[in-house]
Image: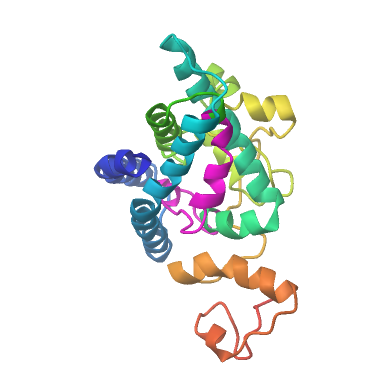
Amino acid sequence: MRASYIALAVPFFFVLIAVEIAVARARKQRVYRLGDALSDLGCGMVQQVALVFLAGAVLAGYAWLYAHHRLITWQGEAAPWIVAFVGVDFLYYWWHRMSHEVNVLWAAHVVHHQSEEYNLSVALRQSWLQLLPEQIFYWPLAILGVPPAMFALALAIDTLYQFWIHTRVVGKLGPLEWILNTPSHHRVHHAINPKYIDKNYAGTLIIWDRLFGTFVEEDEEPTYGTVKPLGSFNPLWANLAGWVEIAMSANVEFGPAYCWDPGYGENGQAPP
C-alpha cells in the first residue's frame, strides 16, 4: 500500500521539481546537475520496483503480528490514528538515527546522502536494500494494535511529507521551525559541515531531535554529500559501495570484477 500511495504522487513530484527549477533560475541559483539528478532518479526508480515486490511481504509480517500478538484492540476511531501518526514518526526518528550509527544500516541508508547537490530529486534517491530492516522498527505499532491499513497510510504520509523538505529554494518558516521538520532543518541533516554531521533525524516532527539532543539549527551554508565522496553517478554502484566498504574493512579481498566502476582504481582499491 505504501508503494501505491507513493506511485500516485510521482506526477506531483515532477511538477514540484519543475517549479523548483523555475524558482532557482529566477533567483539565478544553480541547484541541479544533470548527472547527479539522473543518478537520483535511477536509484528511485529501482527502489519503487523493489517496493512492488517486497511491500506485500513486509505488510504481511506486520499483519501477522497485529493478528496474533497485539496487546490492544482499540474501540474508538481517534486514538489508533493518533498512535499511528505519532508512532510512525517517533519510530522513524529512531530508525533514521540508528541508520547513521550502525554500519550495516548505514551501508543501505548512505545512498540517500551521496548526492553533493540538494534538491527535490535527492528526495527520490533511495536505497534498494533499506526496506526490510527499516520495517522492523515499526513492528511495535502492530503490537500496540494499529491496524495494518492505518499503519500503511500513516507511513505513506510521513514519507510523502519528507519530499518537499529536500530543497534550497525555501528558507526558514518562522514558528513552524519549532515543531515541524523543515527544509532548513533537513539541509543540516544532509550536510557534512562538522557541526551538522549526524543531526536532525526527524521525519515530520522536529520535536524528537529537540527532545533527544540531536537538533542543530542551520546557521552556516551547508556542504552536501558524504565525508567520503562516492565519486560516481552509477546507481548500481551507489547501492553497493557501502557494503563493499564494510567487506574491505573486514579484510575481504576483491578481484578485478569490482574495478568496473569509476569509483575504484585499477587494483580494485578505493580512491583516496
In the shown orientation, is residue 33 left or right of residue 230? left
Residue drawn at point x = 49 percent, y = 17 percent: 73
In the rendered image, residue 249, in percent from the top left (x then y), is placed at 74, 72
In the rendered image, residue 18, in percent from the top left (x then y), is placed at 28, 45
Residue 37 picture quarter: bottom left
Q: Which residues are magenta?
A: 113-142
Does residue 115 belong to the magenta stretch? Answer: yes
**Does residue 211 sit above or below 231 in this rendering?**
above
Q: Nearer the viewer, residue 2 or 115?
A: 2
Q: Nearer the viewer, residue 198 or 175?
A: 198
Residue drawn at point x = 40 percent, y = 46 percent: 120
- The N terminus lies in quadrant: top left
Does residue 261 belong to the magenta stretch? Answer: no
Q: Is residue 94 visible?
A: yes
Q: How is the image coloured?
A: rainbow
In the rendered image, residue 50, in percent from the top left (x then y), is placed at 38, 57
